[in-house]
Amino acid sequence: MRKNYFKLLAVVLSLGVALGNTSCTDDCETTRTYRTTSPVVLPVEQIRNEIASQGPQELINLGKIYVKDNYIFINELKKGLHIIDNSNPQQPQNIAFLKIPGVIDMAVKDNILYADNYMDVVTFDITDPKNVKQTGRVKDVFTYGTADGVTWAYNQQNQSVTDYEAKIVTDKVRSSCGFEVLTPDRIYYYNDMAYYSGSKGPTGPSASGTGQGGSMARFTIYDDFLYAVSQNDLLLFNIKKLTQPVQENKINLGWGIETIFPYKDKLFIGSTTGMYIFDNKNPAKPERVTMFEHARACDPVVVANDIAYVTLRSGLCGVAPNRLDLIDVTNIYSPRLLKTYAMDNPAGLGIDFPSLFICEGQYGLKSFDATSSMDIKLQQHIKQINAFDVIPLGGKHLLMVGKDGLYQYDTSNPKDMKLLSKISVKPVS
Amino acid sequence: MKNVYIHINKISLVFSMLLVCTFAVKAQDEKEGFFRKHKFVNMTEFGGLFGRIKYQANYYGGWYPYPYPGNYPDQYQIKNKVNLSMQTFNGVYIDSKTAAGITIGVDGYGETVLMPLALGVRRTLLQKKEGGSSLQAGIDAGYSTTWLNEDNTGFHTKGGLLVSPTIGYRLPMRNGSAWLINIGYRFQRAEYKMDRNGNEVYWTESNEVRKYKRMVLRLGIEF
């Protein structure tokens, strides 16, 4: 029996040790990964002095695109512009990078490039894209701006800009094993008129000497004027002297202004709640004619043959259903809705009548026959690509940008578009 | 519809396990072959899981622009927790003192319900008198499934390892059954994953690794 007692003692002891070592407190650890923003304060001198013409750099975090003749300007959000030589669409060459802090928008007339530099508008001579020279600057034009959901603000008194940089953080927290529901503070620092920077569409036929931007563009050139929209104003610059714009007029538009799109002698201004139409017969003094209201949504607009094509998409701007609206604007005093088509998640769109191209984000690129606006037919759906913006370049050629690259398609047969080339983009999470 | 099928599957699995047990009992009744040599035993117990939780109380969302750590000292909070546990051990005596078999249990940890499937051993350590009370040790080791668990939208629970050693008394009744009182330790692992939510600018996702460490106290019956 002695042996048994000894065994018992051993078991009890080992159990005791096990209990002692491992307390009766639940051990739960939550690993959280999140994307957040942290503020960065930039002095004005730094913003103004850091402009530089550099060698080609890898494409990353793309914003808007702008096309002028054989050159494609691709915005790397708030960092600068990539310049692509597209003389041969089958083999586009990345030739240079123009570093501009805070750049979101651009427009080109002749050989002069207009771009924003946080609060300023800067002009460049791009005769030699590899050696771009700064020619002029209009100071203190904007007080704040939004890109990629993040809003920066300019403090004129402190001569500084507060911007926010996004970062992905992983951390570990000792948590309650699901027994306590802790609702963490959620603080949103951006205003919700934010738009997704990757979402653009093409403008109509370009005026002489100027290039082509997107339907999400905030800069556009008409006649001798550069129009720029801020969150609530339409700003007018006289560019008779190309190299040095002169600010002439400022029209308050209200709230949530997103885009500007010139069509014939009119300006279509997209906001999160509707579409403003301005009569632009006198380019120095555009006059507001009417407003067409819709549900709150991101709403790139293109216009062709007096029909406005508007895509509404749920996302950062609102909660409207995903759809395509066709609006008859023959009479700009009373635009009327013709028909609505359901879409997956439409972003940028472009029209090369009668072909209509719509980017559906992760759902790919769609090509439609828009000959009859009451009966738009799907012609081709390219899946497995990420499509955000499309620019039809006159007739048989299309430029499409997504999260993973810049694609060019031959659209001579809109039912069977052929891939001409692709420039890869370095993925960011 | 898919959910209904999953439920039918879960329920039928439990039933088939019970059926296996019934067959075992039946086989024992017939006293043939294996079960003549090795007596079937069932131990069904109910009890509580006693422990505490310790968690960080200043817990900021992924949207906070000045994320800790660094800016705020960690503050911990302790709370006592008692949860329900039940289990049934079905096995055979492989010698006069040792029984081995399968343990199926249900452990509720708040909204998370784990259903462990384990291999178990029970052994009599000490018995003063033939047919009298005895001191009994047991251990169950296996995997906690989440078959009985339902998740909130956007969350996924995953089961994990279970280890539970116990020691206790076996108090025989006159009819051949016995009362059981067991006390021991119960370790269970699980994971609780939250899908990414938020928007393109501010999003968050998380995964909680849960190690439940509890003292278990169970009362039950053996027959």
Image (cartoon, coloured by chain):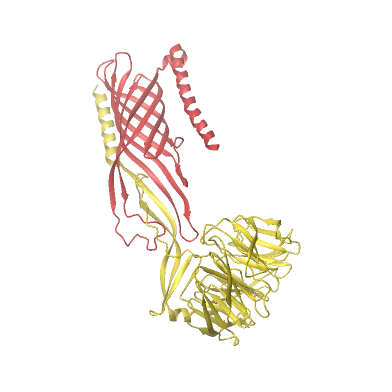
Chain colours: A yellow, B red
- Residue A354, horizontal then vertical, whole percent: 73, 64
Whether residue B156 can be seen here: yes
Q: Residue lying furthest front in this view?
A: A334
Q: Quadrant of residue A168?
A: bottom left
- Residue A53, horizontal then vertical, whole percent: 55, 79
Residue B43 left/right relative to B12: left
Q: Residue lying furthest right in this view?
A: A413
| Residue name at image x 73 percent, y 68 percent | A395
Q: Is residue B60 above or below residue A125?
A: above
Residue A8 left/right relative to B207: left
Q: Between residue A20 and residue A361, name the one nearer to us.
A: A361
Q: Quadrant of residue A374?
A: bottom right
Whether residue A422 can be seen here: no
- Residue A311, horizontal then vertical, whole percent: 61, 61
| Residue name at image x 53 percent, y 34 percent | B4
- Residue A217, horizontal then vertical, whole percent: 58, 71
| Residue name at image x 43 percent, y 79 percent | A44
- Count of residue discs: 0
Q: Is residue A276 above or below residue A339?
A: below
Q: Between residue B133 and residue A273, name the one nearer to us.
A: A273
| Residue name at image x 40 percent, y 17 percent | B39
Q: Between residue A65 and residue A214, name the one nearer to us.
A: A214
- Image quadrant holding the N terminus of chain A, namely top left
Q: Between residue A261 and residue A86, name the one nearer to us.
A: A261
